[in-house]
């Protein structure tokens, strides 16, 4: 791997954030067996981080301890084409990514009119990094205000909900996620 700025950023974010994702509900759903989760997280970030950077969907804190993505749900892919996709595709848990994506898209289509521009905010961080999370939320809101889109924040944990509420996000959907132990909350920010 060459030491390009993009590769250095990917390495920094993966090293800083991956250990915190072991007990994150999203990755617990993606890969239920803890023993396999670290490997799955590395495959996930190796595949998605370059794509998020290339599409300008990645927002990260200055210290690299937290990052988020702002993704247009209309651009979701339901497969793993391209570089490093084969490794993720072969993982028996990869279908969980697609299932969550499908469910989230259906919820978004119910709570927001189709004509509205929207981006899904997904946060990757330890909940203790409140300053970094707050900084990323502010950056996402600024981008939404400038570009005129609605932010949809979806989480399988209640931990960060108070931070998002203080930042002006409103709950739009809450329910047990499928038949899991997780409780899904979808919040919306519309300036």
Image: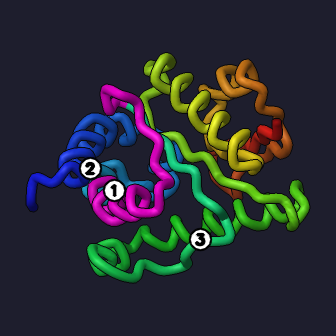
Q: How many marks?
A: 3
**Residue 176 image point, x, y percent:** 74, 47
Give the structural element (helix, strand or loop) at label 2: helix
Within 10 Å of the Cα at label 1, are there few (<14), some (14-19), or many (20+) other Cα atoms?
Answer: many
Question: Residue at point 72% right, 65% down?
Answer: 105
Query: Mark 1 touching mark 2, by CB under 8 A?
Result: yes
Find the distance from the CA under tag 1 to the CA under tag 3. 16 Å
The residue that mark 2 highlights is 10
Find the distance from the CA under tag 1 to the CA under tag 2. 8 Å
**Residue 61 shown in magenta:** yes
The residue that mark 1 highlights is 45
Q: Nearer the viewer, mark 1 or mark 2?
A: 2
**Residue 7 image point, x, y percent:** 20, 54
**Residue 100 image point, x, y percent:** 61, 62
Find the distance from the CA under tag 3 to the CA under tag 2. 21 Å
- Precedes in sequence: disc 3 or disc 2: 2
Question: Residue at point 52% right, 24% down?
Answer: 135
Residue 152, visible in the rendered structure: no
Residue 115, visible in the rendered structure: yes
Within 10 Å of the Cα at label 2, are there few (<14), some (14-19), or many (20+) other Cα atoms?
Answer: some
Question: Residue at point 78% right, 41% down?
Answer: 188
Quarter of the figure with the C terminus = top right
Q: Where is 98 relative to 142, above or below?
A: below
Give the structural element (helix, strand or loop) at label 3: loop
- Precedes in sequence: disc 1 or disc 3: 1
Q: Is residue 71 left or right of residue 166?
A: left
**Residue 72 image point, x, y percent:** 64, 62
**Residue 106 shown in magenta:** no
Q: Is residue 113 left or right of residue 28?
A: right
**Boundaries of the magenta span:** 41-65
Residue 76, which numbered label?
3
Give the structural element (helix, strand or loop) at label 1: helix
């Amino acid at each position: 791997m060459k030491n390009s700025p993009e590769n250095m950023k990917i390495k920094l974010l993966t090293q800083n954030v991956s250990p915190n994702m072991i007990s994150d509900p999203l990755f617990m759903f993606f890969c239920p067996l803890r023993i396999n989760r670290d490997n799955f997280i590395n495959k996930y970030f190796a595949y998605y981080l370059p794509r998020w950077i290339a599409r300008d969907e990645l927002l990260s804190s200055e210290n690299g301890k937290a990052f988020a993505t702002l993704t247009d749900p209309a651009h979701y892919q339901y497969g793993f084409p391209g570089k490093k996709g084969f490794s993720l595709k072969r993982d028996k848990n990869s279908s969980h990514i697609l299932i969550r994506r499908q469910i989230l898209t259906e919820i978004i289509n119910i709570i927001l009119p189709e004509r509205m521009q929207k981006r899904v905010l997904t946060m990757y961080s330890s909940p203790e990094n409140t300053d970094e999370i707050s900084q990323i939320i502010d950056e996402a809101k600024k981008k939404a205000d400038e570009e005129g889109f609605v932010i949809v924040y979806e989480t399988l944990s209640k931990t960060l909900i108070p931070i998002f509420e203080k930042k002006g996000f409103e709950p739009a959907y809450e329910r047990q996620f499928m038949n899991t132990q997780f409780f899904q909350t979808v919040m919306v920010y519309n300036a």
